[in-house]
């Protein structure tokens, strides 16, 4: 059952991410804000901590390639971002305790880093021409807000599903 349930949940979260991210940007007082969801990244990090980092790495490679192709970004941005996040999370939880508060803080930290990884990659290639502080205000802070809400809503549900079906 684990062989089916874990990738199926990843596919569902990838689809939900896609749906949520197509609703943005939202214009507030003449400024566009991008509330970008990172459910798949959070799920991969959950798998890393609570199940098996090898499974998370395989899913990260697979869905990283799918994300890069589907979102038509620079190939490898999601792939390497997911791999780096999974490897870092695996190392961090050899030090930290698997506490809910710590998980939420680390999820938000990884989302912060992932958004910056995106920005730096695109800035180095000369694709993005946005001021860093404007990037923080219009991309990073909204992404952290929506993902905090999603973490609080979905994280307990995913843990229950993994405990029940992915054994």
Image (cartoon, rainbow, N blue to C red):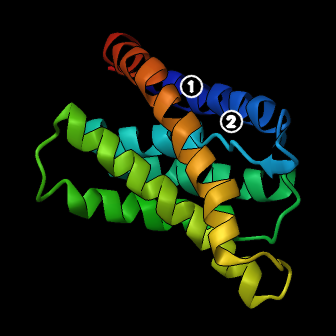
Residue at image position (60%, 62%) is: 115
In the rendered image, which quarter is residue 114 located in? bottom right
Residue at image position (57%, 51%) is: 141
Q: Nearer the viewer, residue 14 or 37?
A: 37
- Is 52 situated left or right of 39 in this image? left
Residue 79 percent location from the top left of the image = 63, 64
Q: Residues within 10 Å of mark 2 (few under 14, many from 20)?
A: many
Disc 1 to disc 2, how far (Cα)?
8 Å
Q: Residues within 10 Å of mark 1 (few under 14, many from 20)?
A: some
Secondary-structure class at tag 2 = helix
- Which quadrant is the C terminus positioned in? top left
Residue at image position (56%, 25%) is: 9
Q: Nearer the viewer, residue 81 or 117?
A: 117
Q: Earlier in the sequence, mark 1 or mark 2?
A: 1
Q: Nearer the viewer, residue 167 or 68?
A: 68
Vertical position of residue 92 compared to residue 67: above or below: below
- Does residue 1 appear in the picture of this structure? no
Residue 155 percent location from the top left of the image = 41, 25
- Residue at the disc numbered 1: 9
Q: Which mark is residue 14?
A: 2
In the rendered image, which quarter is residue 37 located in? top right
Point out the residue furthest to the top here.
164
- Is 55 situated left or right of 40 in this image? left
- Which quadrant is the N terminus positioned in? top left
């Amino acid at each position: 059952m684990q062989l089916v349930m874990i990738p199926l949940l990843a596919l569902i979260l990838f689809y939900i991410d896609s749906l949520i991210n197509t609703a943005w940007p939202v214009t507030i007082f003449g400024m566009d804000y991008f509330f970008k969801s990172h459910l798949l990244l959070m799920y991969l990090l959950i798998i890393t901590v609570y199940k098996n980092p090898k499974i998370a790495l395989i899913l990260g490679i697979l869905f990283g390639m799918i994300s890069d192709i589907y979102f038509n970004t620079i190939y490898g941005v999601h792939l390497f971002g997911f791999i780096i996040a999974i490897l870092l999370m695996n190392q961090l939880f050899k030090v930290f305790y698997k506490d809910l508060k710590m998980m939420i803080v680390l999820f938000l930290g990884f989302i912060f880093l992932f958004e910056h990884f995106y920005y730096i990659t695109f800035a180095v290639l000369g694709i993005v021409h946005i001021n860093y502080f404007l990037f923080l205000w219009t991309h990073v802070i909204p992404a952290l807000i929506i993902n905090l809400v999603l973490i609080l809503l979905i994280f307990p549900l995913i843990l229950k599903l993994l405990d029940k079906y992915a054994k």
